[in-house]
Image: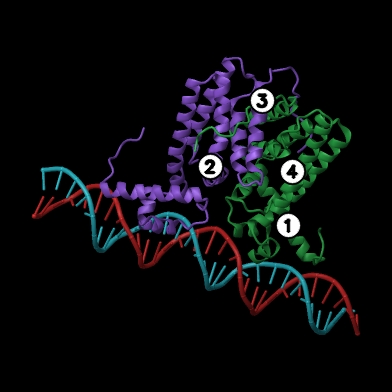
Chain colours: A green, B purple, C cyan, D red
Amino acid sequence: MNSAKPLRADAQRNREALLAKAREVFDAGGFFDLRFDDFARLAGVGTGTLYRHFPTREALAEAVYHEEVATLCDRARQLQATLPPEEALATFLRGMVGYMDAHQGLARTLATLMATGSGALAEGSRALEQAVTDLVAAAVKDGAVRDDVGAGAVMMALHGIGAAHDRPGWRAEADGVITLVLDGLRRSHSGDSGTSTSAGYG
Amino acid sequence: MNSAKPLRADAQRNREALLAKAREVFDAGGFFDLRFDDFARLAGVGTGTLYRHFPTREALAEAVYHEEVATLCDRARQLQATLPPEEALATFLRGMVGYMDAHQGLARTLATLMATGSGALAEGSRALEQAVTDLVAAAVKDGAVRDDVGAGAVMMALHGIGAAHDRPGWRAEADGVITLVLDGLRRSHSGDSGTSTSAGYG
DNA sequence: AATCGAATTGGAGGTCATCTCCACTTCCCA
DNA sequence: TGGGAAGTGGAGATGACCTCCAATTCGATT
């Protein structure tokens, strides 16, 4: 996956400096308020260098995001290996909220990128989604969770939590969403939840 | 609420033209791909006029959004007046999904504006949230719905649904989220849902 | 260690969307 | 119908984004 070309020493150094500064700015939440040119200066390189390493703002975000996602995915696998399925899922989702709480700036940045539809996060998103899908699948197989609602719904809920990072009572409400999702998932697939599709808006 | 100054006839006409064209572009989903100046031309007015009426892109969005939200809020009140609380809530949420499905471009635009944190939607958001809050409150009072998770959580879920408008299986997954939320809400507030807050990420 | 080709740098300047400004036009009241 | 206030629109200033290439730095070779 990560291949092709051994970077020269100074290039490597600059790349590192850019990533480090980017992570810093991300967590501060000011990623989109900063002129991209100024960001280069902040990191101590010229604009040309910045653009050489990261052709767009999104590419830079993707690079940072990548590491974070890798951490989260590892955590998911670890939970899945050590806890009963339902508990693994619950712990992971609760943990995601905690993670976002601790990295609000990142959450904001990601939400913006998502909404912008940049597509730069496609790979990372897929990785995270795969982790969630696996957790849900295991819980379903275990019989602990209904099978008529896909993991995509859980992703949407997480997405909403991240996107709403700036609401006043964020943490409590985010925990509330997770509670609803988990309790909703646990409910044995009883007949009528009223999945009728037409309500006449329009 | 809408007060202060009686617009001159031509001004009124231009304003109308701008709003009409805006609604058109919104639903087509291309609101952010269009140069703002070109939009003025599209509507048949000069850029100066556009900026006079709507100082920013967001202001224009807000103006369009306003009418849509009013419709939705009316619908909510109507449901609340004619259906039992729980059913009113369920019908409203299902209806929201249907509405977004029918207005995907609008959904995308709103999601982008939300994430951008423009704040332009603050008023409309509050109105919608009030409607949801009322629906939930009624259902809680009726005993049909748990009282330990606020309406904010439901808003977050809706937010997530809107923000993810471009996912492949959107409609099915969106319905899934609503199902989870409704079933989660119905569940009698049983002791442990594991609302522990620290899972050791960050 | 000194040389040289190749990789990398960095910032000056081109490009383009946003927004302002004001000379002109349109409207409406007396 | 005339006067003046309200509104118009587009030319051009502003500023962010990105490209390009002369100068520099690296590291392999002798």
Note whether residue A162 is visible. no
Mark 2 vs mark 1, CA separation in Å = 46 Å
Q: Classify mark 4: helix, strand or loop.
A: helix
C-alpha distance separating marks 3 and 2: 25 Å
Q: Earlier in the sequence, mark 4 or mark 1?
A: 1
Q: Dot 3: within a 10 Å radius of its alpha carbon, few (fewer than 14), some, or many (20 or more) residues?
A: few
**Which residue in the structure is indicated by mark 2?**
B102
The amino acid sitting under disc 1 is Ala
Q: Amino acid at mark 4?
A: Glu
Q: Residue at x 56, y 37 (%)?
A: B98
In the displayed structure, would residue A10 be above or below residue A30? below
Disc 4 and disc 2: Cα gap in Å?
26 Å
Q: Look at the picture and state if D14 lies above or below B200.
A: below
Nearest to N terminus: mark 4 or mark 3: 4
Query: Which SS class for mark 3?
Result: loop
| Mark sitting on residue A129 | 4
Residue density around tag 1, few if under 14, some if 14–19, many if 20 or more, within 10 Å: some
- Rendered residue at 30%/37% (across/down): B4
Q: CA distance from mark 1 to mark 3?
A: 56 Å
Residue at the spot of label 3: A192
CA separation in Å, label 4 and label 1: 30 Å
Q: Earlier in the sequence, mark 1 or mark 3?
A: 1
Q: Chain of mark 4?
A: A
| Label of residue A17 in the image | 1
Q: Nearer the viewer, mark 2 or mark 1?
A: 2
Question: What is the three-letter code of the residue carrying label 2?
Answer: Ala
